Image (tube, rainbow, N blue to C red):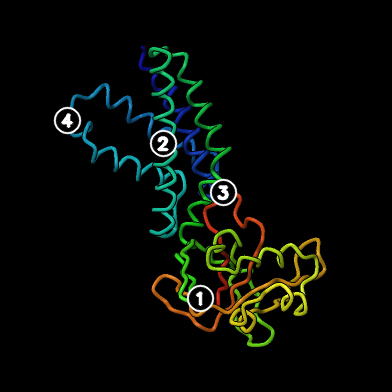
Amino acid sequence: MYLDVIFFENLIINYLILSLTRKFSKKGSKPIKLFLGALLGACYVLIFFLLPYKMIHEVFAKIILSLLIIYMAFTPKTLKEFLRILAVFYLISFAIGGTIFAVLYTAKFNLHSLWIGILIAILLFYTNWDYIVRKSKEEKMLYSIKIEIFQKQVEIKGLLDTGNRLYDPLTKSPVVVVEFLAMKNILPDNMEILLNEEKIDFNKIFEVLKEERWLSRIRLIPFISVGQSKGIMLGFKPDKLVVGEKEIRNVIVGVYKSQIDKYGNYAALLAPEILV
C-alpha cells in the first residue's frame, strides 16, 4: 500500500476518533483543532515507516504522542480534565481498533472491511454509551443492605436515590423502599394480601395480620408519584438495617410490590439521609 493512502486513512480515522472523543467527553473543540490533532497522529505514521529509529516504535513514544494529540485537539485547562478526555480517547481508540481487527479477521483481512469495522464501532458507541455511563454511575451509588427483623435477615443491593424524600410521618424516620419479592422470606405470609389492596388502612391491617408483634411494627407512608396524586405505601420498622458497615435503627422499610430496576441490578432505593 502506498504511504499517501496510509496517511490519509489514518488522518480520517484519527479525526473520527477525536470527534467521538469530543462528543462523549462533552469537551468542546473547534474542527480545525481536531484536524490538527488528527494530522499529528497521521504524520507519526509516516515517521514510523520512514525512519528506522527504534525509539519511535517504543510504547513510551506512542503515549507521548497521544498526550500531544489530546492537548492539541482540546487544550484541557486542568489535569483532571486532561486525564478524563485522555481516558475517553483511549477507550474509543481501543474499541474501534478491536472492532476493526475483528471485522478484518472475519473477512480474512480484506482491506475494504476496514471502513465497515469503523462504522460498526461508531454505531456501537452511539447506541451503548449512555448505558455505559449510567452503569458506571450506578456502580458508585450501589450499596449492600442487610435488613433484620425478628431474628430473620435478608441481604440485597440498594441504589442511593437523591430523589427519595419519603419519611414516616409519625417518627420522621427516613424510608428505604424495597421490593416485596427481595425480602419476602422475612415478611408475614399474608403481607402480599395487603399489598394487593387498592386502599390500605389500619382496620384492614388488623384484619389480615394475625401476629401481634408485627402490628406494632407496621407503618403507613404517604407518597406522591407521577400519574397518581397521592398514595399510601405499606412499611415496617426493622430491628436494624445495615448499609455497608453502618448500622441504622431509626429507619422505616417501605414495601414496594413491583420491580424497582428492570435489569435487576438493585432491589432498594436508599434515602440520602441514611448515609449522613
Q: How far apart are marks 4 and 3 (CA)?
A: 50 Å
Of labels 4 and 2, the one closer to you: 2
Mark 4, other Cα within 10 Å: few <14 / some 14–19 / many ≥20: few
Which residue is depicted at the point 36% across and 29% down? 43
Point out residue 222 in the picture as x, y percentages from the top left corner: 73, 76
Considering depth in this image, is 154 or 44 the residue closer to the camera?
Answer: 154
Q: Which of marks 3 and 1 is nearer the N terminus?
A: 1
Residue with the mark numbered 2 = 93
Q: Are marks 3 and 1 in contact (CB under 8 Å)?
A: no
Q: Do the residues labelled 3 and 2 touch (CB within 8 Å)?
A: no
Q: Which amino acid does label 4 sit on?
A: Lys
Q: Distance between the residues labelled 1 and 4?
A: 68 Å
Q: What residue type is labelled 1?
A: Ile
Which residue is depicted at the point 57% across and 73% down? 271
Q: Quadrant of the N terminus?
A: top left
Mark 2, other Cα within 10 Å: few <14 / some 14–19 / many ≥20: many
Q: Which of marks 4 and 2 is nearer the N terminus?
A: 4
Q: Which amino acid does label 3 sit on?
A: Tyr
Residue with the mark numbered 3 = 263
Which residue is depicted at the point 74% across and 75% down? 207
Residue with the mark numbered 4 = 54
Q: Which of marks 1 and 4 is nearer the N terminus?
A: 4
Considering depth in this image, is 32 or 254 the residue closer to the camera?
Answer: 254
Residue with the mark numbered 1 = 149
Whether residue 24 is visible: yes
Left or right: residue 92 compared with residue 222: left
Point out residue 252 in the picture as x, y percentages from the top left corner: 59, 77
Point out residue 130 in the picture as x, y percentages from the top left corner: 57, 46
